[in-house]
Image: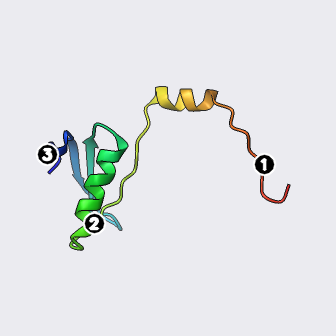
C-alpha cells in the first residue's frame, strides 16, 4: 500500500497501551499521508491516526515566523 503512493515504511513498532502499533512512514507529502490514513480508516477494521513529525530545521523555521494573533475576548 505504501509503495503504491511513493511512501516507504521506515520503522514498525508494537506497543502496550491504547495504541498497539506505530508505523513510521516517509511519505512524499502530507496529502499522501492523509490518503493512506483515509484508505485504512475507511475499511472500519482498524483506526489509524496520523501524526506529522517535524525536523529540527522545520521547528527552527517555524520559530522565526511571527503570526499576528489576538486572543479571544481581547
Among the 4 quarters of the image, the one containing residue 49? bottom left
Q: Name the side, left or right, on which 8 lies relative to 41.
A: left
Residue visible at 29% across and 46% down in the picture: 32
Name above or below for residue 60 compared with residue 46: above
Q: Earlier in the sequence, mark 1 or mark 3?
A: 3
Mark 2 in CB contact with mark 3 (< 8 angstroms): no
Q: Which label was assigned to residue 41?
A: 2
- Badge 3 element: helix
Residue 57 image point, x, y percent:
48, 26
Name above or below for residue 64 compared with residue 22: above
Residue visible at 27% across and 40% down in the picture: 27
* In-front residue for pair 55/34: 34
- Badge 2 element: helix
Report the number of discs: 3
Among the 4 quarters of the image, the one containing residue 38? bottom left
Q: How many residues crowd around disc 1 within 10 Å: few (fewer than 14), some, or many (20 or more)? A: few
Q: Earlier in the sequence, mark 2 or mark 3?
A: 3
Residue 24 image point, x, y percent:
27, 45
Q: Name the side, left or right, on which 52 lies relative to 7.
A: right
Name above or below for residue 31 compared with residue 57: below
Q: Which residue is mark 1?
A: 70
Q: Which residue is mark 3?
A: 4
Residue 34 image point, x, y percent:
33, 52
Q: Earlier in the sequence, mark 1 or mark 2?
A: 2
Q: Which label was assigned to residue 25?
A: none
Amino acid at each position: 500500500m505504501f509503495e503504491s503512493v511513493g511512501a516507504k515504511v521506515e520503522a514498525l513498532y508494537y506497543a502496550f497501551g491504547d495504541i498497539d502499533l506505530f508505523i513510521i512512514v516517509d511519505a512524499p507529502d502530507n496529502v499522501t499521508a492523509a490518503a493512506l490514513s483515509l484508505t485504512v480508516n475507511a475499511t472500519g477494521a482498524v483506526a489509524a491516526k496520523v501524526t506529522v513529525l517535524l525536523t529540527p530545521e522545520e521547528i527552527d523555521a517555524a520559530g522565526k515566523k511571527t503570526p499576528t494573533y489576538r486572543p479571544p475576548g481581547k
